Image (tube, rainbow, N blue to C red):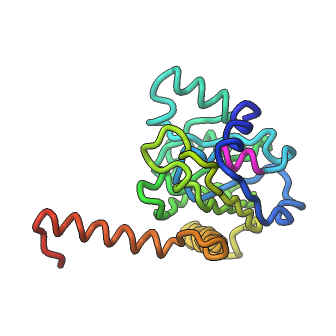
Amino acid sequence: MMVMKPYIWSAVSVHTHGRVNLDQLKAPFIVIGNHSSHLDACLIMGALPRRLSRNLAAGAAADYFFDSWYKALSTSLFFNAYPVDRQGLRNKKGLSGELLNDGVPLLIFPEGTRSRTGGMGPFTPGVAHLSISRNVPVLPIALVGAYAAMPYGASVPVPGRPPVHVVFGRPLKANPKEVPREFTDRLRRYVVEMHDTTARAYGMPTQADFARANALRDAAVADENGLQPY
């Protein structure tokens, strides 16, 4: 990460918010965020204070980043990454739990994959299960502008140092009797709230804007193909 941060920070204009929410946070914990760009892990790890990012292990999709030795090597080297299953950590749950038991904080994107459109997908419940079973807090982070800075399919950030906002939320734990699915939904709502509040403040697209644009795009494609909406 020490190699990647200077490049990323020179390619995009990074703004951080809510750092006061990190003051009392101690390992182990789980960091989550919306996932819309290959910049996301770099932004989060680079924006966190060194005391929190130093041992942070990033969960990376096993079928994408660990399907060949050279991708596995570079991913592990730059991001202290370990493989996770996209379907809610089911195959790698033991490894994630072992890391937390050893005091290692984790970075996991609960959508399981990058957004193709900028809009957030549903969260899988794996993070909530880990948080509840290991009694560790979840640090929610909203990334605003990362999709515009490096859209799906791009290999490098767009020119001009586009603005990206990293918004740190309050560390959360499940409430008494709150089941993983309920905790998962609450985490997602919080990330959406942070995203949209910041997006509106800086004149950037909200999640509703992404959804509207996607619906119009789908309607245009359907019209071109002669399909009738139902």
Residue 9 colored magenta?
A: no
Instruction: Pick out the residue farthest to the front.
Output: 160
Residue 120 versus residue 152 in the image, above or below:
below
In the displayed structure image, the side of residue 112 where residue 26 appears, left or right: right
Residue 229, position in %: x, y? Answer: 18, 76
Residue 120, position in %: x, y? Answer: 49, 64
Residue 159, position in %: x, y? Answer: 56, 45
Residue at image coords 28%, 67%: 218
In the displayed structure image, the side of residue 143 where residue 154 appears, left or right: left
In the picture, residue 200 is in which quadrant? bottom right
Residue at image coords 77%, 68%: 170
Q: Is residue 184 visible?
A: yes
Q: Nearer the viewer, residue 192 or 129?
A: 192
Instruction: Pick out the residue farthest to the bottom.
Output: 230
- Locate the C terminus by quadrant: bottom left
Residue 43 colored magenta?
A: yes
Tell me which segment is drawn in magenta.
42-47
Which SS type dominates the magenta stretch?
helix
In the displayed structure image, the side of residue 190 where residue 92 appears, left or right: left
In the displayed structure image, the side of residue 49 where residue 39 appears, left or right: left
